[in-house]
Amino acid sequence: MTRAYSVVGLGKLGASMSAAIASRGFSVIGVDVNEQAVAALNQGRAPIEETGLEDCIRANRARLRATTSCLDAVLGSDVTFVVVPTPSDATGAFSLSYAESAFQEIGRALAVKDSYHVVALTSTVLPCSSRYKLLPILENASGKLAGPDFGLCYSPEFIALGSVIRDFLNPDFVLIGEADARAGAVLEACYAAILQNAPPCRRMSLENAELAKLALNTYVTTKITYANMLADLCERIPGGDVDVVCDAIGLDSRIGRKYLTGGLGYGGPCFPRDNVALGFLARALGTQAQIAEVTDEANRGRTARLLERLEALIGHGVTVAVLGLAYKPLSHVIEESAGIDLAVACARTGATVVAYDPLAGLAARGELQSFVEVFDSLGDCLRGADVVLIANPDPSFRGAVSAALQASSKPVTVVDFWRRLAPELDGLANVRYVACGRASDDMEGGQMLARQWTGVLSAGLSQAASDD
């Protein structure tokens, strides 16, 4: 059976999902309360910035349309994905206000629809949200029952901004929480037809799926933070190199290499808040999620700890160039960006701070305002810099940074938090290259450890003598 789809919410994920599903040959109706977003999609334009989205929309325009009416969308489709914001509230929990509004409208549409319809929520929510908060809204608004009359699933996506379309179409696995088996079977069949890579599918209760989404994200952030801890240790050990260590331990199948790369802290619209939400959930259930809470605390303090190491380089009279203001490479998003945090913190020391990002410059300019001058050109940003901080490993920096610095004879210190530019910068006459996560002073680290172990040895011998 060939199904038609609707997607409620045309943000970065919703708009990209709409285009991706259409690219697989299916009819898709996008829904949003924002009339500008609806008009953009209907005109073949991307309503938001996301890598490859505009091209995908243009290529599949014949199968894509948008509306502000949930009634129109539900009546014109068989399955509705709900991709609306669930912002964090003051307690760390996720607000359901946008989801409640969407489900109210979808329920009203279901009331006048004769055929079976599946509603699949993809937004991140706390466990029990779907069954005890959102499902009753659908039933009350429609006058129908979940199961015999319509289906409800919770099926979050595991994507990264900047590669949403690719990630959606090629996931590692599919996660489906189902209110009943019929709804889960329909959605599983839909994914089998839409996705490109035939991933494994795990179907379970709504609550287990809701927890699994949070659990996966918080586990990944723990892995990132662990690698950052190793990076700090490697800087203090003679010959220490976090990439060498992580390459080795990543070969163990119990660990794996993904996300095990020391650098700056994680950011973006999902990871930071998910740890906080898991902590809230644990407290609400009368238990603890200490690992999630400690991970969040360590991540939020990472910029300050790194700046302590850079204290001798940054201050009044120093021009600092920060490269990379998006929270990750190939993204326009600056939410919870370590690069933004670095730029602001450097400016507060009295340094003159300039910055550049190939995609997020406009958004960063509005965020940083009078603190930092954001340039449209990498060359302009680097001109006159005394210190350069590589805040995210954007591939466009390779070659371009070394070319710009070679054109000037001005001495400059480059601090590379990701160690990506070592092959081209290490050894340049006018560049002092500092790779975070690698030892830069073996003598200092060796002497520190020698003093430590000499003290331990002496203490051990004294204790042994007293015992005799």
Image (cartoon, helix red, strand yellow):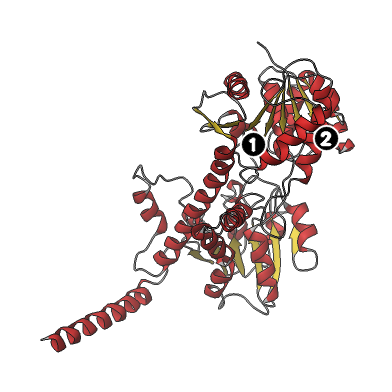
Q: Residues within 10 Å of mark 2 (few under 14, many from 20)?
A: many
Left or right of 121? Residue 185 is left
Given residues 78 and 375, the one toward you in this image is 78
Image spot of residue 106 (x, y percent): 80, 30
Instruction: Inspect the image, locate mark 1, and give the three-letter code of the amino acid beneath it.
Output: Val
Left or right of 199? Residue 117 is right
Residue drawn at x 69%, y 37% is 13
**Mark 1 to mark 2 CA distance (whole Å):** 19 Å
* Residue 111 seen from this side: yes
Residue drawn at x 84%, y 20% is 112
Image spot of residue 398 (x, y percent): 56, 49
Instruction: Inspect the image, locate mark 2, and give the three-letter code of the amino acid beneath it.
Output: Asp
Given residues 226 and 127, the one toward you in this image is 127
Given residues 229 and 30, the one toward you in this image is 30
Residue drawn at x 39%, y 60% is 241
Residue 164: image tag:
1
Sequence-first disc among 1 and 2? 2
Q: How many marks?
A: 2
Residue drawn at x 32%, y 78% is 447
Toward which corner of the image does residue 348 lie, by quadrant?
bottom right
Image spot of residue 442 (x, y percent): 36, 71
Q: Residue furthest left?
A: 468
Quarter occupied by the N terminus: top right
For numbered disc 2, what is the local secondary structure?
loop
Q: Which residue is mark 2?
A: 32
Q: Residue furthest top?
A: 1
Quarter occupied by the C terminus: bottom left
